[in-house]
Image (spheres, rainbow, N blue to C red):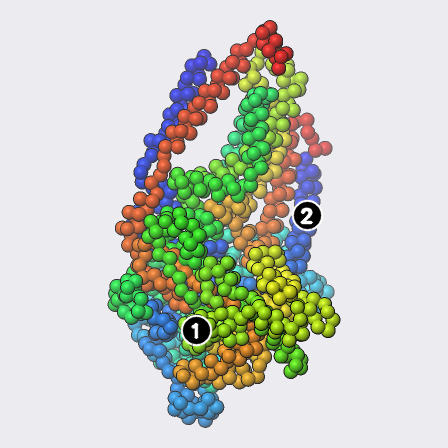
Amino acid sequence: MGNYIFRRLLYGVAILVGVNLLTFVLFFAVNTPDDMARLAIGGQRVSQDAIEKWKAERGYDKPLFYNEQQSGWASVADTVFYQRSLPLLRFDFGFSDSGHDIGHQITQRMGPSLALALPSFVLGLLASVSFALLLVFFRATRLDFAGVVLCVVLLSISGLFYIIAGQWLFAKVLRWVPYSGFTQGTDMLRFLVLPVAVAVISSLGSEARFYRTLFLEEIGKDYVRTARAKGLSERVVLFRHVLRNAALPILTGCVSALPLLFMGSLISESFFGIPGLGSYTIDAINAQDFSVVRAMVFLGSALYIAGLLLADLSYTLVDPRVRFE
Amino acid sequence: MLGKLFKLFSQVAVVLLLLPLAACTDKPVNSPYGPDAMAGNTLFTAFSQRSPKYLDPASSYSVDETPFTYSIYEPLYGYDYLKRPYVLVPRSAQKVVAPTFFNAQNQPLPSNASDTDIAYSVYDIPIRPGILFAPHPAFARDAQGKPLYWPLEPNALEGKFALTDFRHTGTRELTAHDFVYAFRRLASPRVVSPAFGVLSSHIVGMREYAQTLRQADQALRVDKGRETWLDLREYGFDGVSAPDDHTLRIKVIGKYPQFKYWLAMTFTAPVPWEADRFYHQPGMAQHNLSLNTWPAGTGPYQLVESIPNRRHVLRRNPNFRGEPYPCQGEPSDRKAGLLDDCGKMTPFIDQIVFSLEKESVPLMGKFLQGYYDIPEADGGDYGVAMKVAAGDSASKAALYKDHGLQLLTSTEAQITYLGFNWLDPVVGQGNTPEQQEKNRKLRQAISIAFNWEQYVSIFLNDQGQVAQGPLPPGVPGYQDLPEGLNDQVYTWNDGHAQRRSLDEARRLLSEAGYPDGRDAKTGKPLILHFDSAAGMGSNATLDWMRRQLKALNIELEIRATDYNRFQDKMRQGSAQMFMWGWVADYPDPENFLFLLYGPNAKVKTGGENASNYDNPQYDALFKQMRDLDDGPQRDALVDRMVKIVQHDMPWMFGFYPKSGGAYQKWVHNAKPTQMVRNTLQYLRIDPATRVREINRWNAPVWWPIALVVLLLLALAGAFWHVMRRRETATALVRDDDQDRKDKD
């Protein structure tokens, strides 16, 4: 297994280099350093002198990939790509184009992102699994049919609608929670109740349908018939046997998604005023802040690779038959 | 056993479900702030999209930064809060001074000296004594007078990410040397300032000084690394100096009457060298500690909390001397209660809390609940939007009235225009005199066809004023109707401006060589191109434009692009028609008329003349006008210039957008403006009214909880019942059941 992990990590490094290159090429295909400077300086009187100063301060005054004025290794090393990419591999994100320490921002914003994403994820999983089990318990009845219809309705509605409707109902009409905002400590709960509830409900339809399918697939198998034949109640059959055996795809899906929780939610964070990493990324894209965009894409890729690796590893824990030899 | 368990579970569930009801109260529970926050003398407002990017006065130029920078820093001058047209008043200066003129032999000249005789102007500005900087760790000193936080020990910054993390602070008196230091910073290679280009072309020796600093900086970086402080006190230049601690001397090349307005901007606000030195220490940047994030000023407020993209808090500067509230204003100000606080010391508010609101739905929701006193401190969008909404919806109008909201609008010193590229062969100047006249007639026909009154009505809900020329109201030289009428596009009929007829436009089009919208020589239809920076080419505005030209049988092709590419096109001069705007830096006609000054052409010089308009007569008049003091002679020149551009039509003048503010009824002294930027110090709030109204508007509605609890119990019961029936059902199906299933 050690060899397997090492091999996967090596692949991961290669993927990260590729992702970094792709991000770089895509970003500078639509933005020049002059564009970035012009937007960053802002205002109405942006002189070329100011643009040159801005670029020089941030190292964007160098060629992007190849420096013809240098020779040997320096022709590659004295470029924007090289000087911006190398520190990334040791997770040194450097400074944003607006002069803030990206690493510090990430550590500051990871907390709010997780405060929203973790409960949403855990409660969403619990709600979806419970609802799916309920539907399976009442399978082939009108209740099951109604539940499936409800799921289809829920998954057909845009996530944005849940947010706006949730704010309208609970913040405006009933006035139970604030519209938006964030704070530290236990008072944070007041601000998280609504976004978490919205996240749970908006993911309920698709996830419950998926889990229902998994459970139904299991429930027709021989071991379930055996369990029933020996007199186990339906609840015991579902919770002790079906749920355990259907847990493999659920668990692997969840494990691979776990690291990405750090990246936050783009829309929810914006609407609910939660200063997490999702809104950080969106802000950076709007401000054409290449340093932050590159750092967040890199971090997202690294977390995704880690998630997939963890998912693979979790197979061995859940299903002893799986081995990596 | 199962029944007992169910009974127990039911009882626990009922208790848990009814628990929230026990917490039910009439008091609001939806406040986004802590308990009793609304009872304090604190103004709550929001900022959208992102935190201010630059709080360094040398770099800050965006509108969203001004509530911070103009509250924290005090430039030499400011604008009177109430008077219109805008009037310069001293802030950190003792008075607004007139320059002394000198000839090339350094001999003083009289104030009415000829412009050609004036070699340079000297502004000797007296600084108010006794002004203190807000508490800042850069000033903190030990008992021996040595700086406490310079130089810092290694690891001294551990855990410090805000100024409030430093235990000690200090202050000192503002001197003229702080202004000198601020001007020197503008030329520093380490500071990016949008003002450097303009100021260095007017202040004696500033451009050369920038070269000197560049060389010094390079040498310093080679010797000691890039984080080393470049002490600007060691490098001076003749253009800005301090003859004594309370006199600032600025030498301006020739005569530049608009220079005084630059002294009302934060670019020229004082910067203490101690702060610059303090922030140029190893590790400061990594801890987000810089003048961009933690300013050091003398203004009425200081920044005490700054969580990027979440919350910023300004608190009353304990060292601020207090400034009296103005006693004079416009005639309507007394009736509006704006003079009630005459002579009282400002600022009135102790603390200002800015919270991030990226989306307008929660922002407006909280504003209507009373949790924001003003929805935005920097701009005028929400007041206009709410006024439009109230006009469209009777229920909203009633709600705003019930809440006593103040929706105040004013036409501001800004313009949105549709420009013709003067370099374009079809709509531009033209090569020959004959072609020039034809192209002028084409522009005139187009200008008549574009019904801007309709545009303002449809897209701005009348929250704008159709422009007759390049100067907006409030700017000296602006002429109201009928004197200011653009007679190329309008006629004056029965006391109002009437747009010339489409028939006349068609005649002009024909004379331009395009009868019925077709080229007279080739017979091909005339196709014009509009370069849009607003994304895809199918929005309502662009459709409206197409329809305007369709009335003349002219096709309009939209070339939609993003703003970066749009700017590229403008710099290369490849756009044909485009829409752009200008917000005044200062209330002077020069700040608008320079947008059409030939030497400012964007293609040639990268200047702000986006149309690349070039008219030697206009340019000559501009030079004269620029150097004149305000007065009838200048007004006459401005009038001639306006007539020239009305005749040449390098722009369709478009409209002057209105600016508006929305204020709760407990906010006093509100007067919307885009020119006066230190408005926060004049606002006053009544917290008692705020608390009372918030309690009235936000009483929670609890009864649905009971309904939900009952529903959940009913559902749980039903499920339990079905489950029990299933659990206890026999494996074999009874005969009558089998019969029923067969029938189904």
Is A255 drawn above or below residue B15 in the view shown?
below
Q: Which residue is found at the position 47% from the left and 86% from the top?
A: B254
On screen, residue B736 versus residue B668, left or right, reads right
Res. B481 mark: 1
Q: Quadrant of the N terminus of chain B?
A: top left
On screen, residue B83 versus residue B53, left or right, reads left
Would you say residue B189 is visible in this rendering?
no
Q: Give the residue number, with chain letter if any, for mark 2.
A: A15
Would you say residue A271 is visible in this rendering?
yes
Q: Which residue is found at the position 55% from the left and 69% from the top?
A: B501
- How far from the left and from the top, in percent, is residue B344? 25, 65
Q: Which residue is found at the position 46% from the left and 48% from the top?
A: B361
Classify 10 Å Cα crowding around label 2: few (below 14), some (14-19), many (20 and above).
some
User: Chain letter of disc 2?
Assistant: A
On screen, residue B588 versus residue B439, left or right, reads left
Q: Nearer the viewer, residue B546 or B580?
A: B546
Amino acid under disc 2 = Ile
Classify 10 Å Cα crowding around label 1: few (below 14), some (14-19), many (20 and above).
few
